[in-house]
Image (cartoon, grey):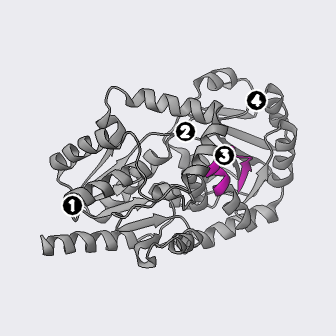
Amino acid sequence: MKILILTGKFGMGHWSASQSLCQQLTRAFPRAEVRVVDLFAYAMPGASEALYRAFHLLVTYGYGLFNTYYRLADHLPADTGSPLDRPMLERLEELLLEERPDAVVATHPICAGLVSRFKEETGEDLPLITCVTDLSTHNEWLHRGTDCYLVGSPEIRDRLAAKGVEEERILVTGIPVKEEFRLPGHRRGGEKRRLLIMGGGLGLLPRKDRFYEALNGLPGVETTMIAGNNRKLYHRLHGRYEHIEVVGFTHRVWDYMAQADLMLTKPGGITVFEAIFSELPLLLWEPFLQQEKNNARFLLRAGLARSAAKEPEECLEAIRTLIYDDHALEQMAERMRGRKEALESQALDRVLDAMVRKREVYA
């Protein structure tokens, strides 16, 4: 069996989900060949990095424009294309001819749409699984050629079904995370409290010195900040405060989560589910991207997180209120435990195997 996972590096969430799915599928099918491909880098080798940089600038400085587009696009019909579709579709055809996969998994909506269009134009019965990497039912994810959707929660399954997707084609798997996040943590209790702060793969963290000075002075609190790819912030803060450890990009996020009592973060889909599987209570910065606003709304309603304002003083007060409250922290962790126990972690393996077998029978 050969499985091709298609993705893009707009932020690191889609890429991270692809790596986690690769790990899961390799474990489930030891004799299979599983390959992750950044379709944008493959299709536009001379332009993909510029495209990713432009996206970074847009979501950092022009998020109002991005949110307006995102909301409007949700009212467009499913399978609406983009100007990049035709040149990328030609390159996708070359990739599929070269790889000849038995199934494709897409962790980015454009990748899912391109494979769907390829199937329609060629009549290929190539199984397509779309992994939705936010708690979202946005129309950008909905494509006629998708055989199975992987979604983060029963609520998302129900909302997709209300949009006309057959319920049997929707699996509630949670957003994929690496196996290490499923290991039990070894935190909580004792005099010291451990706070983990993450800004996502782009390292979107507070810039004001007074925030870090006050954070450093919280009694009994040891803070770890993961700055991601924000090298400027890393160099400015690294080694400056006695009770704040600053870490750059790391592949061992799971280890930091396992040791923390509370995490302050933006509500990106991957980070949220890494925390749920780690049973790590969440404090959410007020989000500015529409997808993250949707994620935050879900988490707050489910009692899996509390919110923190962007302003330094209000944010610090939210930290003080929650990090010393053992009862509230344990309640959040217990709800997360219940959520992850309900996820269909093995269902993807069975469904993918059935799809490939069916394709082989009718080939």
Residue tagged by mark 4?
Answer: 242
Residue 285 is covered by the magenta coloring:
yes
Mark before the other along the chain sequence, 3 or 2: 2
Where residue 281 sits, quadrant-wise, is bottom right
Do tag 1 and tag 2 residues touch (Cβ < 8 Å)? no
**What percent of the width, then of the height, locates residue 93?**
21, 47
Dot placed on the residue nearer the N-terminal end, 3 or 1: 1
Residues at marks 1 and 2, CA–CA distance in whole angstroms: 31 Å
Q: Earlier in the sequence, mark 4 or mark 2?
A: 2
* Amino acid under disc 1: Asp
Mark 2 or mark 1, which is nearer the start of the sequence? 1
Query: Which label belongs to residue 201?
Result: 2
Can you give x and y, in whole percent of width and height, for residue 205 in the image? 68, 34
x, y percent for residue 216? 80, 34
Residue position marked by numbered label 1 in the rendering? 102
**Does label 1 or label 4 sit earlier along the sequence?**
1
Quick check: marks 1 and 4 in contact, CB under 8 Å?
no
Side of 118 where 297 appears, left or right = right
Q: Which residues are magenta?
A: 282-295
Quarter of the image containing the C terminus?
bottom left
Q: Quadrant of the N terminus?
A: bottom left
